[in-house]
Image (cartoon, coloured by chain):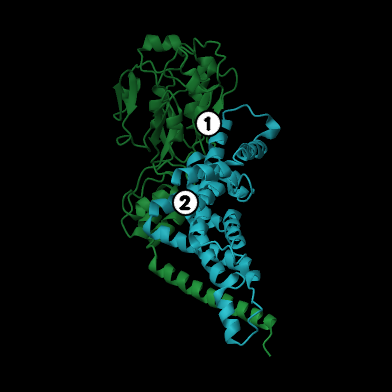
Amino acid sequence: METTIILIQIVVGAALINNFVLHYFVGICPFLGVSRRLDTAFGMGCAVTFVISIAAFLSWTFTYFILRPEAPLPTWVWATLGGDPSVHVDLSVLSYIMYIFVIASSVQFVEMYVRKFFPPLYKSFGVFLPLITTNCAILFACLEIMKHLQDPTRLWGLPEAMALAMGGGIGFTLAMVLMAGIREELDLCDVPRPLRGAGIALIVAGIMAMAFMGFAGVDKGLETTLSSMLH
Amino acid sequence: MITLTSVTIILAAVILVVLAVVVAYILGWANRAFHVEVDPAVAKINEALPGANCGGCGYVGCLEYAEAVAASRAATTLCAPGGNACSQKLADILGIEAEQTEKQLAVVHCSATLDERLGLSAYDGEKTCAAANLVAGVQDCAYGCLGYGDCASACPYSAISIEKGLASVDRDKCLGCKKCITACPRGVISMVPFGAERTLAVICGNRDFGADVKSVCLTGCIGCKACAKLSEAIEMNGNLPVIDYDRLIPQGDLETVAAKCPMNALAVIGTPLNRPSFSGGATRDKRSRESVQVS
């Protein structure tokens, strides 16, 4: 019960309240670059959700067993070599290089897999899949997961990490689709000449971010509603 | 002596090396396991195509046409810009006999410049043929060129220009992609086979009777049948001569047939172009003389 509430809270939190794009401003590049048409924006959102889930799974595994303080692998190595058990080997310096490595290789793998087994999907993703390698929203999700594995007393399990990734991916897709819808309508509007293109897109993004600020505080209400529903 | 620093460094290096090897192995395996057979002919065919992506073949781009050709779903002759040479190359790649097609170029079936059209109204609307065509009585001839240049803007090779309100095709630039045919709301343009360097074409599209044509145009075909009597390749159909290009002998005396036309609605076109840019006060007699001389 308790874990379900926490998972729902994480998903809603990552998708709406702390939307990756509109709250943390990560993944702005595809948000502005691929949001001209609704269908491509949705495709990009789905691709990111897919890759972010895989990357979150891998990065949680690596972080939990290798990178976090008091992780099993370095502790075991240290103990085997006869080190002082009160001191811990901390490999969290490796986190960035590991995450980049994991993201890049999983994107490669996913690309090959999709190309072989889902050719139409590969055709529609085509350009976007390799672009996701450099999507900072995914690295952000990995780092967010790492943050929750720093404190050994309150560790995130795999379900929490996956919930964050899914929520983040859904939030990213939502922001992309909303932005694409607005920009498709914007094409028909009489935008002042100096603001056309990127200018008006940035203004729209800012207003959308302000609108998403309205979700702040939803988590408290959600928590009370869910717990009253479950008990 | 084992220190924390040395263990951290060595452990980090070992972990990264192991990870790199494992990932390299997985990706290498995936590359082979998920290998997609790509027909090597597709790349070759795509290279042999002009790469204009004009869409004249009916496929979205050159690559899609290349895929269709490689899968034997499309004929090798569909590429108009590439012409016979391209068709030959494609056939060589596929190892089949090349079919020869006659080059087809766009011809505007109207020869009336603005001062030769009658009943022009003061049209002040959107300057496109598609819009002007919706206006009844924008000009009296319902078959002729409107001259707002929808075809010229549709042409990817800038082969069409508007001279004196009449679309004229530069057949050195035209590659036969047929974009102008779809762009013209009146169907004034069509493709004419250019087996030889020059050919005969009817440069009027008016299907009305002679008297009606004379009331709307100074140079329209009046359906006098003079050309049909002279040449076996020409038959009359709905007050207009229709040229059977299979029977037309390109080396024949096309000029005599063209000169026979009292309205200059029949012309020898091709290189050299028969239609010189006649300036201001060119008379009809002068025009017909020029057309014979040049061609």
Q: Position of residue B198 (x, y in %)?
A: 43, 37
Judge by depth and name the residue closer to the eye, B173 or B71.
Answer: B71
Q: Residue at x 60, y 27 (%)?
A: A189
Q: Nearer the viewer, mark 2 or mark 1?
A: 2
Residue flagged by tag 2: what amino acid is it?
A: Phe
Mark 2 lies on residue? A125
Q: Residues within 10 Å of mark 2 (few under 14, many from 20)?
A: some
Tell me where residue A94 sits by quadrant. bottom right
Mark 1 lies on residue? B152
Q: Tell me if I can see residue B185 in this picture.
A: yes
Tell me where residue B282 sits by quadrant. top right
Tell me where residue B248 sits by quadrant. top left
Q: Position of residue B181 (x, y in %)?
A: 43, 31
Q: Is residue B45 left or right of residue A93?
A: left
Give the answer, above or below, for where B124 lies relative to B29. Answer: above
Judge by depth and name the residue closer to the eye, B47 or A156.
Answer: A156
Give the answer, above or below, for where B115 lies relative to B4. Answer: above
Q: Is residue B276 left or right of residue A150?
A: left
Q: Secondary structure at mark 2?
A: helix
Residue flagged by tag 1: what amino acid is it?
A: Ala
Question: Which of the chains bears the disc numbered 2?
Answer: A
| Rendered shade, chain B | green
Q: Secondary structure at mark 1?
A: helix
Q: CA distance from mark 2 to mark 1?
A: 35 Å
Chain letter for cyan? A
Give the answer, above or below, for where A214 lies relative to A115. Answer: above
Q: Position of residue B151 (x, y in %)?
A: 49, 30
Q: Position of residue A138 (x, y in %)?
A: 57, 56
Judge by depth and name the residue closer to the eye, B56 or B81.
Answer: B56
